[in-house]
Image (tube, rainbow, N blue to C red):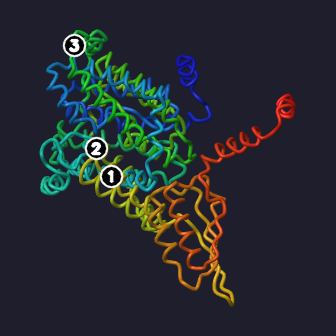
Amino acid sequence: MLGTRASAFLKLSKRDLKYDLPASIVVFLVALPLCLGIALASGAPLFAGILTGIIGGIVVASLSGSQLSVSGPAAGLTVIVLGAIQQLGAYETFLLAVLIAGAMQFVLGIVKAGMIGNFFPSSVIIGMLAAIGITIILKQIPYAVGYDSSFFGEESFIQLNQENTFSALEKAMGAIHPGVLIICAVSLAILIFWPRIKKLNVVPAPLLVVVMGVVLGQAFTGTALDVGNEHMVAVPIVNSFNEFLGLFTFPDFSQLFNKDVWIIGFTIAVIASLETLLSLEAVDKIDPFKRVSPTNRELVAQGIGNMTSGLLGGMPMTAVIVRSSANVNAGGRSRQSAILHSVWLLIAVLAIPTVINLIPLSCLAAILLHTGYKLAKGSIFKQMWHKGLDQFIPFIVTILAVVFTDLLTGVAIGLVVGIFYILKNNLSNAFEYDIDVNDHGAKITITLAEEVSFLNKASIQKSLYGLPKRINEIIIDGSQSRFIDKDVIEVIKDFEQNAVSKGKTIELVGIVNKKNVPNIKRFTQTILKNNVPKKERIKQEEE
């Protein structure tokens, strides 16, 4: 069944190809240094990063139901991967953990664990997107000016080189490389103004940026503006097909019963799945067609992707928001762009590694700066402000938490704040009321909400016993409620007795534990049945 789906998905759509082809080039340009940088920071071979990106496009995108998400090695797993390789002692043993993690993800998808992704409030997801945008900008500024102190694609506030985001920025301002800065400035100008010229818009702006970066980088060679190889992309150079085959590494199955391998595999499976579900939800938010990605199918696809990666020597992968948002901003329409970006990664390693190594990191940083701005532009903050504090505060808290910690920690903090406001709103919206004042006093009709849980008990009790004395007629209507908690019913019944003792008129409508209704009905029917003469009862049963 999966094979049939995969073959169907790999068919190119001519309708979308004119959008997906240029988008795939942009995603390729963004993904290339990210794959290399994350592999370098994780202590894995550089080729492992490229291989993971290739598998993420060709395998995962082919099986996934998401049209725009792009998978590859994730910066959020860097510390875990680095520690796991060191703990297990051999990269081949680590590959077995990746294979196990993929199998676990596959099972999670089969048992429909992807539903977890539906429980993240939209304010937190939008906040995560804006935070990623801000993080991209802050992390890419050093590369834009020529201070390449950490790996390309770093996301955490505390970097692996023990600098933090702001200390790196401070040092970058004192180490500006004029040639690098000029290339980045020209790149940004092209990205901003080129799309406005409709006649020239046939050539994608990011592709022009890379061509311009290579030309300027070569023109600056031997001058005071010389960029130098340390500020360029560094793809492993393969001289022959046999040498290419030699880059693949295979898992050590002799360690299958090593408990540390299973613990690391489980850890990777859980964290990779959470990051994937978050990225999937975020991509759906910025999808111009507002398509909804099937989360369980995504976990199955990610599981197969990670099993493939573990078998061939790659790294653990997730759906990645940076590459995915670059895909959306570049005009991608379908999963073709993700599949094609992997093809370009493969060609880059096999056919043109020398040319790829002429690309300055600063022009790629410019592409990411432009993407970051689109994710965190001011109109998003304004829109969230107008939605009210219950949306704006979780949004802001998520941004700050992600920027000053990391993606998963920041989202967890934002989620706690978001849940607090959800509960707060739930408590305050337990009922509606209508007061009718007459000559003899006042009448109040209290209509309970559709769902009344034990969390609403305190607010309902306080409101009932706090009714003004002049109200002498009370109607509590629960007929529209699908569920009323037993504790709440008990509070209402107690209040009924209290109101009657004070001479007030009170009427309860539909205030019953609906789960008990069938039992009462059955009990009543039994009593009636037992009181019917035997002959008549047999006649009724026959009818």
Say which residue label 3 marks: 255
For the residues labelled 3 and 1, the Cα–Cα distance comes to 52 Å
Inspect the image, locate mark 1, and give the three-letter code of the amino acid beneath it.
Answer: Val
**In the depicted structure, whether residue 39 falls above or below residue 452:** above
- Residue at 49% x, 77% y is 466
Q: Residues within 10 Å of mark 2 (few under 14, many from 20)?
A: many
Inspect the image, locate mark 2, and give the three-letter code of the amino acid beneath it.
Answer: Leu
Residue closest to the eye, 404 or 507:
507
Q: Are marks 3 and 2 in contact (CB under 8 Å)?
A: no
From the viewer's perspective, tell me whether residue 447 is left or right of residue 528.
left
Q: Are marks 2 and 1 in contact (CB under 8 Å)?
A: yes
Q: Measured from the top left, where is residue 321 in percent x and y? A: 39, 42
Q: Measured from the top left, where is residue 366 in percent x and y? A: 32, 49
* Mark closest to the chain's N terminus, 3 or 1: 1
For the residues labelled 3 and 2, the Cα–Cα distance comes to 50 Å
The answer to whether residue 467 is seen in the rendering is yes
Inspect the image, locate mark 3, and give the three-letter code of the amino acid beneath it.
Answer: Gln
Residue closest to the eye, 113 or 433:
433
- Residue at 61% x, 78% y is 504
Say which residue label 2 marks: 216
Q: Nearer the viewer, mark 2 or mark 1?
A: 1
Say which residue label 1 marks: 186
